[in-house]
Amino acid sequence: MKFAICNETWQQPGAPRPAHDGLRADEWARTCDAIAATGYTGVEIAPFTLIDNPRDLTEAEAVQCGAIARAAGLDVVGLHWLLVQPPGLHLTTPDASVRQTTAEFASHLARLCAAMGGKVMVWGSPKQRSLDPTWSSDDATARAADVLHHICDVAGPLGVDVALEPLGRAETNFLTTAEETIRLIQRVDHPACRLHLDVKAMSDEPHSIPDIIRASRDHMVHFHANDPNRRGPGMGEVRYEPIIAALREIEYQGWLSVEVFDYTPDAETIARQSLAFLQKVTG
């Protein structure tokens, strides 16, 4: 199996960062070198770590980012944390102008992802999809399906999949199980609309993680390795041997990408320990 890690592990989202004019190319290069030095062969990118406002990132700069990663010996897996910046984006809102802006921005990200050499956009962004209690769930689902179809019309021809990510109930009230997410994927009805699974999120579901993986085999395109304690794989109570067995059973050929939310003690330790554990359990 192929191992990647999310680049924000080195930036620690939420930590103060000075404003910067344009692409943080030097910082990106240092991060790529650090990731490669720990033994990973892929990097997954949070766009807001590259530039203060990802709307300002050009396709030429995206090409540059991809070249920097490859020079360090890394493949660009794709993008995640898609709607953190800029503010004002939302998938399910009744406000048609906000949905249009969201579709346009995500289409921009699809072009950037392709320019970097990435193949997947992980659609998490819980705050930017959660439903207001006054909204009809059916109407919100229809709105989401329409937005996602338009984005997939851009992403698909570029070779980029839009991978919807179920998230835990503490984070959102929309797409909280793989089953619900697959129903939306089927409603979008586009070959570029796929499923992403995350160990932390699946731990909140009523079914076992291996059972969720097996039930999702026809839709899954990407996978995050972590733990409900917000740390890396092997740093909590989740048993990974049955998870790896299920991934092998469905003949998963994608990346195992490490995503953490607790950045202690430091990026290098997290990266090395996570990779050593994954190499051990995958044999």
Image (cartoon, grey):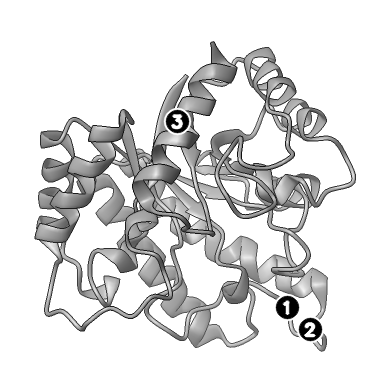
Q: Is residue 131 left or right of residue 21?
A: right
Q: Residue at x 28, y 40 (%)?
A: 35
Mark 3: secondary structure: helix
Q: Residues within 10 Å of mark 3 (few under 14, many from 20)?
A: many
Q: Residue at x 48, y 79 (%)?
A: 89
**Is 95 above or below relative to 274?**
below
Q: Is residue 184 left or right of residue 265?
A: right
The amino acid sitting under disc 2 is Trp
Place of residue 223 in the rendered image (x, y in percent of width and height, measured from the top left)? 56, 37
Q: Nearer the viewer, residue 13 or 60?
A: 13
Q: Nearer the viewer, residue 88 or 207?
A: 207
Q: Could you tell me if the residues under marks 2 and 1 are in contact, i.e. CB atoms within 8 Å?
A: yes
Q: CA distance from mark 3 to mark 2?
A: 43 Å
Mark 1: secondary structure: loop
Q: Nearer the viewer, residue 253 or 148?
A: 253
Q: Nearer the viewer, residue 206 or 233?
A: 233
Q: Is residue 42 left or right of residue 176?
A: left
Q: CA distance from mark 1 to mark 3?
A: 36 Å
Read off the residue under disc 3. Answer: 275
Read off the residue under disc 2. Answer: 135
Of all residues, the one furthest to the front in this rendering is: 265
Place of residue 107 in the rendered image (x, y in percent of width and height, measured from the top left)? 36, 62
Read off the residue under disc 1. Answer: 131
Please identify the quarter of the rendering in which residue 8 is found: bottom left
The circle drawn on residue 169 is none
The amino acid sitting under disc 3 is Leu
Q: Split into 4 quadrants, where in the image is the C terminus?
A: top right
